[in-house]
Image (tube, rainbow, N blue to C red):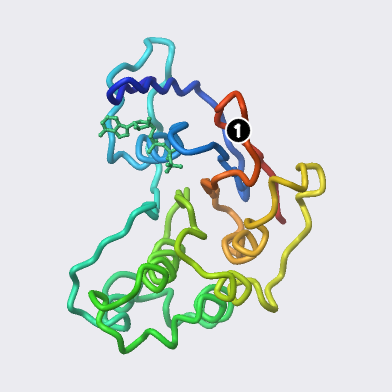
Amino acid sequence: MSITRGKFKLRVMEGGSIDSQIVVVLGENGTGKTTFLRLLAGSLRPDRVESSDAGMPEINVSYKAQIMQSVSTFTVRTLLHRRIPDSYTQPQFVSVVMEPLQIDKLMDKPVVKLSCGELQRVSLCLCLGKPADVYLIDEPSANLDSEQRLAASEGRRFVDCTATAPRSLLSGMRHFLSVISFSYSSHVYLVCFLPSFSNQDRKLEYISYLPF
Ligand SMILES: Nc1ncnc2c1ncn2[C@@H]1O[C@H](COP(=O)(O)OP(=O)(O)OP(=O)(O)O)[C@@H](O)[C@H]1O
């Protein structure tokens, strides 16, 4: 399938995935990461589907957008209660996702008063707490300061499944993968990152691995 946005054209070829797979999508600004995720999330429609394509399969997705805004006057606690009622009290989810993201400090704040980084943490928590087959996570580390990035990884399990990926690609993403690849093991995660190096071809790149 393909989509044209202004002068930008993205063509997506059919692929496959297996349970417990993490696919990291890397590309510089404007290479189409968000467009690709929004196609998968169903918030953008392709303008062409080739007849050879099987089309989009029926999948349950949980999508964390890159840019988040909220005018909700609810507190974070109320939002979690309404949106992820089962997950946010589940001990495993609390210890593997909510504690590293330090959601407890934000519980009584109105969502509308959260800073960009605080909203990013809550959005990541909401995304991971929603039951889904595929988690689409656009730039999970955007807006977080380095302390928060470290806090998100502290004490977390990280299975070093990244040995075959170039080290330069991995900086900045390891700590998030430790949170993201938590033990709901039968799901697929697509995570977008800006690369930490310059890619002269300006192509999207994919690294896929199995953390379990
Ligand atoms: N609504 C739109 N109208 C016209 N062009 C658009 C629109 N939205 C996106 N584009 C163009 O599509 C291209 C891909 O954008 P996209 O947001 O998918 O890139 P990205 O890789 O996620 O970038 P970034 O790293 O900056 O978030 C860009 O060139 C952008 O200018």
Taking depth in this image into account, of 110 and 49 the one nearest to the observer is 110
Q: Is residue 1 above or below residue 67?
A: above
Which element type, helix, strand or loop, lies under badge 1?
A: strand
Picture quarter containing residue 149?
bottom right
Picture quarter containing residue 96?
bottom right
The residue depicted at 71 percent of the width and 70 percent of the height is: 157
Q: Is residue 156 above or below residue 69?
A: below
- The percent position of residue 182, horizontal first and vertical second, equals 61, 65
Q: Is residue 43 above or below residue 182?
A: above
Q: Is residue 163 above or below residue 125?
A: above
Taking depth in this image into account, of 181 and 76 the one nearest to the observer is 76
How many marks are shown on the rendered structure? 1
Q: Amino acid at mark 1?
A: Glu
- The percent position of residue 200, horizontal first and vertical second, equals 61, 27
The residue depicted at 39 percent of the width and 37 percent of the height is: 40
Mark 1 residue crowding within 10 angstroms, few (<14) / some (14–19) / many (20+): some
The quadrant the N terminus occupies is top left
The quadrant the C terminus occupies is bottom right
The residue depicted at 34 percent of the width and 17 percent of the height is: 49
- The percent position of residue 54, horizontal first and vertical second, equals 42, 20
Looking at the rendering, the quadrant in which ligand 1 lies is top left
134 horizontally vs 181: left or right: left
Q: Which residue bears the numbered disc 1? A: 205
The residue depicted at 78 percent of the width and 57 percent of the height is: 160
Asked if ligand 1 lies within 8 A of label 1, the reply is: no
Residue placed farthest to the top in the image?
51
